[in-house]
Image: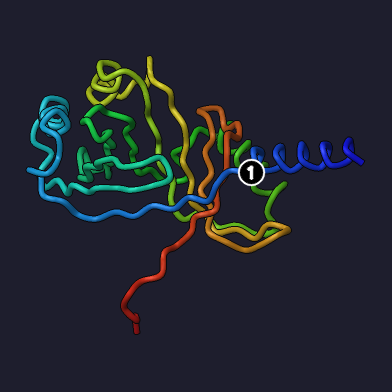
Amino acid sequence: MRCILWLIWILLVCEVHAQEPDKVEFERRVSPKDVPLSARNWIEEVYGDPGKIRWYLEQNERGFSYEAKFKWNHKQHSVEFSEAGDIEDIEILIHWDQIPIRARTRIEDYFKEHYKRHKVRRVQYQLTGAQTELRQVIHDETMTGVTVRFEIEFSGKSPERKSLWEALFDRHGNFIRVRRIRISPTDNLRY
């Protein structure tokens, strides 16, 4: 009996660790003066004057971060910084057909295998790496020295449920993870 209970406990622990938690994010607009100086300086040094920058304080399952959103070179950029003002990643909004064909084919195969139906809502490059390499990517767009991933938001019907999802794939289209996006209810009724 003791062995059976032990086995059940191990299976429950393994199942919990195998599941990705839902994505739950709350963003609120903040004034530039509320953002760490190092984050504001990094944007200025790398992008020069990108025009209108909207700053947000984001809370998610990992904690707090700051995010700068703006348009640069005709593309939507989102640059995320830690609470201390250290750069975490750069996300650049792209179109589905801008994903290289081999990677796109692998991603499509993943969707076909795991979802009865799906509709891609948003595609972004997600760039991570050292500050110097990220700075270089912004200026020459070669994507060398950084980790390139595709972050894809999509609505999909899996065998278990229909929901809004966020999937992450590497630069070759290999699956990394998927999380269900939990939409928070609003305090106001919308008509």
Q: Quadrant of the N terminus?
A: top right
Mark 1 is surrounded, within 10 Å at the Cα level, by few (under 14), some (14 to 19) or many (20 or more) other residues, namely few
Measured as percent of width and height from the top left, residue 30 is found at: 16, 51
Q: Which residue is mark 1?
A: 19
Could you tell whether 16 is left or right of 131 in the image? right
At x 22%, y 30%, the residue is: 84
Residue 121, compared with residue 178, is above or below; it is below
Please tell me in which quadrant of the rendered image residue 161 appears.
bottom right
The colour scheme is rainbow
At x 41%, y 40%, the residue is: 62
Mark 1 belongs to which amino acid?
A: Gln
Measured as percent of width and height from the top left, residue 96 is found at: 47, 45
Could you tell whether 24 is left or right of 54 in the image? right
Please tell me in which quadrant of the rendered image residue 144 appears.
top left
Q: Residue furthest bottom?
A: 191
Measured as percent of width and height from the top left, residue 80 is found at: 28, 37
At x 24%, y 41%, the residue is: 66
Residue 53, compared with residue 150, is above or below; it is below
Measured as percent of width and height from the top left, residue 68 is found at: 21, 42
In this rendered view, identify the residue nearer to me: 36 or 163. Answer: 36
Callout 1 secondary element: loop
Could you tell whether 109 is left or right of 186 in the image? right
In this rendered view, identify the residue nearer to me: 103 or 157. Answer: 157
In this rendered view, identify the residue nearer to me: 1 or 103. Answer: 1
Please tell me in which quadrant of the rendered image residue 131 appears.
top left
